[in-house]
Amino acid sequence: MTAETTAAPTGTSSRGSRLLGVVTLAGLALVVVLAFVATAADTDMGESVRLIYVHVPVVTAAYLGILATTVGSIMFLWKRSEWWDLVAASSAEVSAVFMGLTLVVGMIWGKPTWGVYWVWDARLTSTLVLFLLLLGYQAVRRTSVDPLVRGKRSAIVGLLLLPNVVIVNRSVEWWRSLHQEPTLLRLDPTIEGLQLFTLVLAIAVATLLLGWLVIHRFRLAWLQDQVDRRWLVDAIDERRAEVPA
Amino acid sequence: MSDWGYVIAGWSITAVVIGAYAVWIVLRGRTLSRRVPPEDRRWM
């Protein structure tokens, strides 16, 4: 084993995460070529159908991140482990980014498709509520410096996320909605051929991207906790040193 | 705006936001890792 392989990394990357990053970037390049060059425009939606290859993968990744947050929250409440708390927090933050993008790209897609950027319809409104819940999760994590209190409070909010995903996902069936019904998750998918392949590949690549981001965000959160802990110990030592013997 | 305008806007915003977020994570991680001893930052 060489000195290079035994040395601690200087950031949040490792050999595994670098490999994952390279595979993800290669996949993204392939998706861009397929989405912009190889696939044809849609007979109904025209060129704007190319937004499906970014909108659907981004929202799918957000849902998977929320699933990770739910698992992390349950495991934290059960085991009281910092590791699970950081898994939940990291995936929730990445999911908030993806969910925000879902709303923005959805609005951009809505304008050429429906003629408006936003309507208070069931799918859009429930997605906005889910995004606000994810922001609320971030706010709750900043209300306490005690890791146990912070973990418990945020885990409880984390458990509210997944039921909302079900509401968002089913909203187009439960209520009348402008938003189209599921494209893939049905017995007769509404797209086929190269369009279907590109969409499935884009979802797979978005999942890899989610994994890369969560891994690095988890390590960043871990480093932040170590720094905070050391600061607390140093502060206590300083106060003790001020007290006369 | 043409359909292509909306397509470019949607893809560009996604790329910029995720790219900026990834860069922030990596740079912040490098800064913090200098303040943590090597034994506490050995990743799997």
Image (cartoon, grey):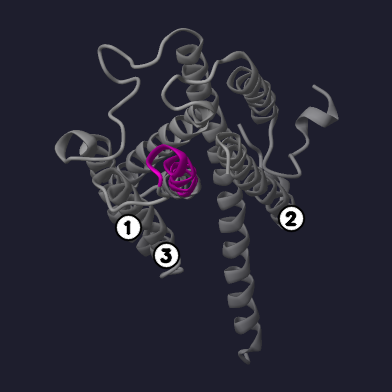
Left or right of residue A17: residue A122: left
Q: Is residue A230 above or below residue A71?
A: below
Q: Which residue is mark 3?
A: A139
Mark 3 is surrounded, within 10 Å at the Cα level, by few (under 14), some (14 to 19) or many (20 or more) other residues, namely few
Q: Residue at x 64, y 72 (%)?
A: A234
The amino acid type found where label 2 is placed reads Thr
Residue at disc 1, secondary structure: helix
Q: Which residues are magenta?
A: A99-115
Quadrant of the frame with the N terminus of chain A: top right
Q: Position of residue A208 (x, y in %)?
A: 55, 27
Foreground pick, B25 / A184 = A184
The amino acid type found where label 1 is placed reads Lys
The residues tagged by marks 3 and 1 sit, at their Cα atoms, a distance apart of 14 Å
Q: Residue at x 57, y 63 (%)?
A: A229
The residues tagged by marks 2 and 1 sit, at their Cα atoms, a distance apart of 29 Å
Residue at disc 3, secondary structure: helix
Q: Residue at x 46, y 18 (%)?
A: A200
Q: Which residue is mark 1?
A: A152
Foreground pick, A14 / A51 = A51
The amino acid type found where label 3 is placed reads Ala
